[in-house]
Structure formats: structure tokens, C-alpha cells
């Protein structure tokens, strides 16, 4: 495996430092994912920008986490599952939703379940979603804009999930309490 540097604000390429400074200002620490992204000023800036843009979507905080965590689970990203479990708790996403997303089981709320199912179809079918599945998503109360926002959230997760797979990004200590493994989930 190729070793990737987990940069600090001091070791990061000059073009990454402004983004890293903003991340530390916002979160109080530099997550290993962003420290890894820092190797490429374009990648770290893109991830930070896309995250901010996704936060402006029509989705609630819980709905955004449904999109993100569904991607994380399907892409088997242990780093992002731990991080987004922590973030979901901070955003007061109900525990039953977090637990179901970690396990890949149905959500009790039919509208939220429609979002989880549609997101899974987008990921698993690489965007070649059957028109009937789009109609079912719309019939659940979502909009055509929301269809595109699921794709936006999926694009965001491709950046982070794939980076974590290739770089082997270690889970930060602040996320360790929410560590996740597909193997443990399958056994549950």
C-alpha cells in the first residue's frame, strides 16, 4: 500500500493551508481525512466546498446524514461511518435512524425510508436508476431537486470514501467511540 501523509497545517502544501485553517477554525481540530486530502490543494478545497454546498440542499440534517451514511455503508467506509455517526449525534439525528443506517436496515418513517432506498439505488446502480424508482421517490414527497441533491451527496461521498480506501485514513480519536465495521454489522 502506498503511504499517504496525514498533513498538519505546517506540513501541508501551501495551496492547502487556507482550507485547513478554515477546517480547524470550524471543528477545533484537523480531521485525518482533511489532513490526507491536503496532499492535493484542489482535492481538499473541492471536498470542503462540496460539503458546504450539500449543507445548503433542501434536505434536513437528518436527511443529509441518511444520504451520506447510506453511501458510507454501501462503500464500506469505516472512517466515514465513524465520523458521520459522531456528526449525526451532534446534529441530534434520532438514535433509531443512526442505528438503522449503520446496520443497513429499514427506517421506520416511510418518507425517510424512501430517501434511504433511493440513495441506495443511486449508489448500487451507479446512477442507472429505473424511472419507476424515481417516481416512487417523488411520490414519497421528495422533489426533482432532491433527486439531484442525492446525486450531489453521493458525489461528496465518492470523494471521501474512495480517498479513505486508497489512503487507508486512520479513524480520528474523536470518532473512535463510533467505530464501525461491515463485518460486525453483518453479524448483528
Image (cartoon, helix red, strand yellow):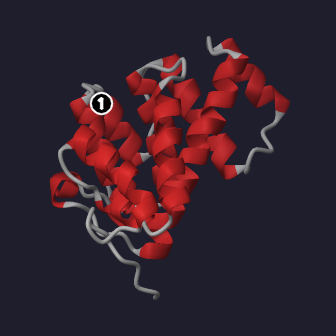
* Closer to the camera in the image, 161 or 95: 161
| Farthest residue, direction right | 131
Q: Circle 1: is it few (<14), some (14-19), or many (20+) Cα within 10 Å?
A: few
The spot of residue 62 in percent (x, y) is 39, 25
Q: Residue at x 44, y 74 (%)?
A: 167
**Residue 121, located in which quarter of the rendered image?**
top right
- When the figure is inspected, residue 30 is found, relative to residue 121, above or below; the finding is below
Relative placement, left or right, of 167 versus 79 is: right
**Residue 79, located in which quarter of the rendered image?**
bottom left
The spot of residue 27 in percent (x, y) is 23, 42
* Closer to the camera in the image, 27 or 15: 15
- When the figure is inspected, residue 176 is found, relative to residue 4, above or below; the finding is above
* Closer to the camera in the image, 113 or 67: 67
Relative placement, left or right, of 180 versus 69 is: left
The spot of residue 25 in percent (x, y) is 24, 41
| Farthest residue, direction bottom | 1
Whether residue 74 appears in this view of the structure is yes
The spot of residue 17 in percent (x, y) is 36, 57
Whether residue 118 appears in this view of the structure is no
State which quarter of the image contains the C terminus: bottom left
Q: Which residue is mark 1?
A: 96
Amino acid at each position: 500500500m502506498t503511504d499517504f501523509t496525514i498533513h498538519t497545517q505546517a506540513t501541508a502544501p501551501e495551496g492547502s493551508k487556507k482550507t485547513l485553517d478554515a477546517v480547524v477554525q470550524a471543528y477545533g481540530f484537523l480531521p485525518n481525512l482533511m489532513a490526507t486530502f491536503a496532499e492535493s490543494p484542489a482535492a481538499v478545497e473541492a471536498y470542503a466546498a462540496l460539503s458546504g454546498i450539500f449543507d445548503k440542499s433542501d434536505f434536513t440534517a437528518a436527511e443529509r446524514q441518511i444520504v451520506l451514511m447510506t453511501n458510507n455503508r454501501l462503500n464500506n467506509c469505516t472512517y466515514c461511518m465513524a465520523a458521520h455517526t459522531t456528526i449525526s449525534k451532534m446534529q441530534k439525528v434520532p438514535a433509531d435512524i443512526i442505528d438503522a443506517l449503520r446496520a443497513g436496515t429499514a427506517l421506520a418513517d416511510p418518507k425517510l425510508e424512501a430517501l434511504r432506498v433511493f440513495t441506495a439505488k443511486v449508489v448500487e446502480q451507479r446512477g442507472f436508476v429505473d424511472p419507476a424508482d424515481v417516481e416512487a421517490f417523488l411520490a414519497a414527497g421528495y422533489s426533482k431537486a432532491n433527486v439531484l441533491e442525492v446525486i450531489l451527496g453521493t458525489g461528496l461521498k465518492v470523494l471521501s470514501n474512495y480517498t479513505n480506501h486508497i489512503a487507508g485514513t486512520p479513524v480520528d480519536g474523536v470518532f473512535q467511540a463510533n467505530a464501525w465495521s461491515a463485518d460486525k454489522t453483518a453479524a448483528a
